[in-house]
Image (cartoon, rainbow, N blue to C red):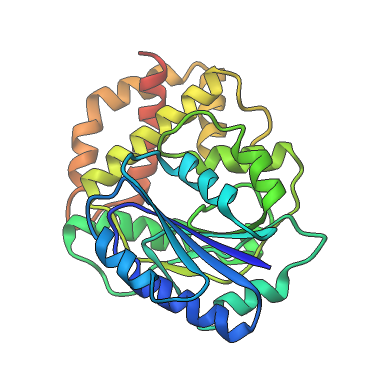
Amino acid sequence: MLSILIPVYNYNITNLVYNIHEQATRTKIEFEIICFEDGSNKYVIENKSSIETLMHTSIIVSSLNKGSIKSRQILSNQASYNWLLFLDSDVIPKHNSFIEKYINLISPDTDALYGGVAYKDEQPETEYLLRWKYGKSCEEINASKRNRKPYQVVVSGNFLIKKTIFNLINLKIKKNSYGLDNYFGILLNEKKARVKHINNEVYHLGIDKSDIYIKKIENAIETLLWLLNERRIFQHNNKLLSIFIYLKRLKLNHFMSLFFRVFNTSIKKNLLGKQPNIFFLQLYKISYMCYKDLQ
């Protein structure tokens, strides 16, 4: 009935797999857990030894890093069942009824269920503060709000999807880079997939350091620009892209590009500091997008 698929890169997934296995076993459904080590050089032995002790659980080890899109496709190809639950390796379910809740909401009228993401209340050290603060402010969104625009907040770290729909969408994504969750949501929209958001969160534990997170944001913006310039995007609910297109239409993108060149160092200083301002982060994103587009 359910294939639980976990792409892994340099992360210890023992607690996650034990948690998910116990929950799935308790529901008495037919299930499998498949993990894919995507060119990892850490925790491979620990993960393999833990997984091999559990029934209905297997691990595929790749010596090459294939990236998130290809690794999820490999997992889908290996899956035995028609419903795929994708989980990032650095998450843990918020509730002990996590699997049961997904199972109870499976319906012929739904193509995908998105459970959402949460962050622990304890404030981390300064070097992790930006990612944590952004997550608490912008990613912890109640399902009632997410369902107003179901294709806008599409988080790949925790979602259940029909195998046929996943393959239809994922096989269209040829680029392998950070920030493709947005594109996955855009393609779901274009295919009129029936997406429903629910409150069935996982805690995001593997928070990036602030400097790494800023670099990932830049990569995601470059990916978004590439998709736009290659005419891969038609319908979308992406806020950043909408603002960018609006500014460009008014010829204000040149001003924002200049703003980035003048103030990006000052903004970064705030974002890397003890009191990162999320408004400054959003300003950094849109000005960086205008700057890169004009290069």
Q: Residue at x 52, y 71 (%)?
A: 56
From the viewer's perspective, is 158 left or right of 80?
A: left
Task: Give the side of residue 94 with respect to residue 206, left or right.
Answer: right
Exactly how many numbered labels are in the figure? 0
Residue lying at 39% horizontally and 38% vertically, measured from the top left:
66
Classify 158 as above or below 179.
below
Q: Residue furthest top?
A: 295
Q: Could you say which is closer to the camera, residue 276 or residue 214? A: 214
**In x, y percent, where is residue 229?**
53, 18
The location of residue 10, given as percent across then percent down, is: 27, 54
User: Where in the figure is residue 2, as x and y percent of width and height?
Assistant: 64, 66
Residue 64: x %, y % from top left? 33, 39
Q: Residue at x 44, y 33 (%)?
A: 176
In the rendered view, tell whether residue 292 sits above or below residue 184: above
Pick out the residue farthest to the right.
109
Q: Residue furthest bottom?
A: 26
Would you say residue 120 is visible in this rendering? no
Q: Is residue 165 visible?
A: yes
Q: Is residue 32 left or right of residue 283?
A: right
Q: Is residue 294 above or below residue 90?
A: above
Quadrant holding the N terminus: bottom right
Measuring 44% from the left and 20% from the top, which residue is drawn there?
253
Image quarter hosting the C terminus: top left
Establish if 220 lies above or below 30.
Answer: above
